[in-house]
């Protein structure tokens, strides 16, 4: 009985191993199906034309002067028309390296952007606070001058009152 239990345990452990191998195999098959084949462009025609041109140049040259050979090859290659495809694209979602892209965007750009907005807001708020403080100080100084003027009017004699009235009239329009 004990031996049968041991055999059952060994079979169970073997079944677990087989199950894990089957799971890994299916995962690998899924990954293989995700891999796309990139078609390799066919340059054989262009290479053949270049080779024929090089052979023609070699046959036309009487001397084996490499410099003239290179010049002629360059001239032939510069005459070959090239197709240029210009693309202007804005990629919101990248085709490759998605993890790195999102790490950069959400890990660096967005927090720095938020910091820049907060700093700009605090700067404008600080400017307004400084203006408000200056206005408050000016109002306090103006109230102090008014209290001083009222105090002088209350305790002044006629001659001082006449001098205060002329000073008030002289500075009224300024």
Image (cartoon, rainbow, N blue to C red):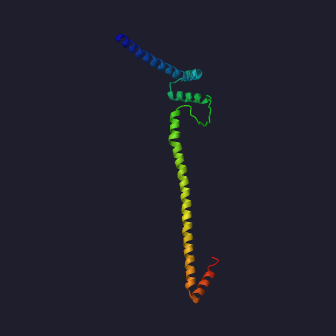
- Between 81 and 135, which is closer to the camera in this rendering? 135
Q: Please give left or right for residue 132 compared with residue 19 in the image.
A: right
- Between 152 and 31, which is closer to the camera in this rendering? 152
- At 52% from the left and 43% from the top, the residue drawn is 109
- Count of number-bearing discs: 0
Above or below residue 74? Residue 166 is below
Give the x, y percent position of residue 24. 47, 20
Above or below residue 109? Residue 3 is above
- At 55% from the left and 57% from the top, the residue drawn is 125
- At 56% from the left and 63% from the top, the residue drawn is 132
Give the x, y percent position of residue 71. 55, 30
Quarter that holds the N terminus = top left
- Between 106 and 63, which is closer to the camera in this rendering? 106
Above or below residue 73? Residue 14 is above
- Between 15 and 42, which is closer to the camera in this rendering? 15
Give the x, y percent position of residue 36. 55, 23
Identity of the residue furthest to the left in this view: 2
Q: Quadrant of residue 85?
A: top right
Identity of the residue furthest to the front in this view: 1
Above or below residue 166? Residue 13 is above
Give the x, y percent position of residue 77. 58, 28
- At 56% from the left and 88% from the top, the residue drawn is 157
Q: Please give left or right for residue 17 compared with residue 34 in the image.
A: left
Quarter that holds the C terminus = bottom right
């Amino acid at each position: 009985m004990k031996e049968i239990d041991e055999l059952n345990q060994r079979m169970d452990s073997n079944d677990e191993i087989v199950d894990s191998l089957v799971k890994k195999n299916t995962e690998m098959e899924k990954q293989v199906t995700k891999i796309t084949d990139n078609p390799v462009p066919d340059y054989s025609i262009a290479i053949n034309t270049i080779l024929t041109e090089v052979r023609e140049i070699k046959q036309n040259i009487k001397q084996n002067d490499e410099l003239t050979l290179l010049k002629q090859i360059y001239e032939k290659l510069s005459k070959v028309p090239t197709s240029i495809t210009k693309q202007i694209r804005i990629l919101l979602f990248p085709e490759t390296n998605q993890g790195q892209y999102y790490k950069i965007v959400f890990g660096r750009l967005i927090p720095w952007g938020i910091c820049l907005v907060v700093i700009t807001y605090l700067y404008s708020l600080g400017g307004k606070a400084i203006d408000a403080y200056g206005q408050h100080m000016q109002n306090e100084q103006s109230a102090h001058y008014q209290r001083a003027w009222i105090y002088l009017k209350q305790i002044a004699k006629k001659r001082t009152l006449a001098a205060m009235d002329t000073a008030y009239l002289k500075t009224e329009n300024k």
